[in-house]
């Protein structure tokens, strides 16, 4: 039976560390502030934003909510972002995705000041990450590094396999594992002999978005298995990309779904907000 990496506990530890940092900053007269922009009425986005604001309340980070109607024009949103860029009291800016179809998401992300880009999605943040400059790291992959390290696992020299190459998970994950001196392979839907590759991984990050796609036979004995997937099984129950029941018998370490990678994303967002306030 593998060691179950407790994302709820680790994310709570990080939020408590952030809370301490926020108190120290406030004692120096700096009040970390995150602006959260939400466009439209997508129910899932409302839930995500509410959870981010709740985490701000917990850690003591000031949050400013900007809710715009679904028919907001691109130019209006860009102007709002520019105003937040210029506002010295705002340290982090988050525009909740997805945006309505009349708005070009890339244009909006590009408009956020890279020094306030706490989601780490802008091309400048991605470029900084790639060449090892200080900057904001995309929250989900940065949270995965914390999960691995805080479980006492060294990444140095390990054979790391990531399945998935999205801009928000797979690609930044590769850069972060490389920074930790992992030997990194990135797989995707065109990869040949996928299961042969995954079964050689010391550290496997599954981010394909397919329920229980990886079984015990796809995993190396004792591997660290990080399950990013947020999928639904045949009964509509939340599950990951990894078949937890069989894989947990073989892996050395495993993240559950829920309670693994999921809670880390918001914790890392809070960490990025404090970093933003410390830098300015
Ligand atoms: P995505 O943009 O849909 O990317 C999926 C990736 O998987 C793509 O690179 C795709 O390859 C690859 N893929 C699809 N089928 C494959 C197959 N049969 N074999 C090998 N590779 C395959 O997804 P994402 O945004 O990265 O998210 C992945 C999963 O993580 C989803 O379940 C999502 O809900 C979850 N997620 C969780 C969190 C969290 O906080 N826990 C955050 C973000 C995402 P191609 O590039 O070739 O199409």
Image (spheres, rainbow, N blue to C red):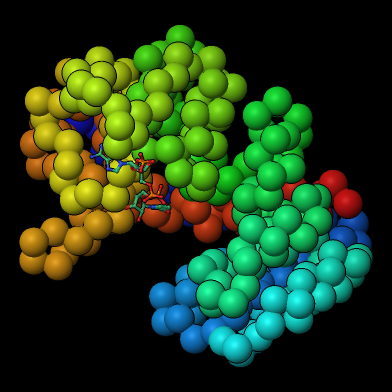
Residue 147 located left or right of residue 83: left
Residue 175 located left or right of residue 128: left
Locate the N terminus by quadrant: top left
Which residue is at the front of the view, 10 or 201? 201
Residue 131 image offset from top left, x and y in percent: 70, 25
The quadrant holding residue 119 is: bottom right
Q: Going 61% across and 64% down the picture, which residue do you hit?
A: 105
Q: Going 29% across and 27% down the picture, which residue do you hit?
A: 191
Seen in the picture, residue 129 relative to 221 is either above or below; the reply is below
Identity of the residue furthest to the top in this view? 157
Asked whether residue 274 appears in the rendered view, the answer is: no
Number of marks in the rendered image: 0
Which residue is at the front of the view, 136 or 106? 106
Seen in the picture, residue 80 relative to 263 is either above or below; the reply is below
Residue 112 located left or right of residue 41: right
Residue 265 image offset from top left, x and y in percent: 50, 53
Q: Going 62% across and 50% down the picture, which residue do you hit?
A: 121
Asked whether residue 195 appears in the rendered view, the answer is: yes
The quadrant holding residue 61 is: bottom right
Residue 130 image offset from top left, x and y in percent: 65, 29
Residue 277 image offset from top left, x and y in percent: 81, 55
Q: Going 35% across and 29% down the picture, which residue do you hit?
A: 187
């Amino acid at each position: 039976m593998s060691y179950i990496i407790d994302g709820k506990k680790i994310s709570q530890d990080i939020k408590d560390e952030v809370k301490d940092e926020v108190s120290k900053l406030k004692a120096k007269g700096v009040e970390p502030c995150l602006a959260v922009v939400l466009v439209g009425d997508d129910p899932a986005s409302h839930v995500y934003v509410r959870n981010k604001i709740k985490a701000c309340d917990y850690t003591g980070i000031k949050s400013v909510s900007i809710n715009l109607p679904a028919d907001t024009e691109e130019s209006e949103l860009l102007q709002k972002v520019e105003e937040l860029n210029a506002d010295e009291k705002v340290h982090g800016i988050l525009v909740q995705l997805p945006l309505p179809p009349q708005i070009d998401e890339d244009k909006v992300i590009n408009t956020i000041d890279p020094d306030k880009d706490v989601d780490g999605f802008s091309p400048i943040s991605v470029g900084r990450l790639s060449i090892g400059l200080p900057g904001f790291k995309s929250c989900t992959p940065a949270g995965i590094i914390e999960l691995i390290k805080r479980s006492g696992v060294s990444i140095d020299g390990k054979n790391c396999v990531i399945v998935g190459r999205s801009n928000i998970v797979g690609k930044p994950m590769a850069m972060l594992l490389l920074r930790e001196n992992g030997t990194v392979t990135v797989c995707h839907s065109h990869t040949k002999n996928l299961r042969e590759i995954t079964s050689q991984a010391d550290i496997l990050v599954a981010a394909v978005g397919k329920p229980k796609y990886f079984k015990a036979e796809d995993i190396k004995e004792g591997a660290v298995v990080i399950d990013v997937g947020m999928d639904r099984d045949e009964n509509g129950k939340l599950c990951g990309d990894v078949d937890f029941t069989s894989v947990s018998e073989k892996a050395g370490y495993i993240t559950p779904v829920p309670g693994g990678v999921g809670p880390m994303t918001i914790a890392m967002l809070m960490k990025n907000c404090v970093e933003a306030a410390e830098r300015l």
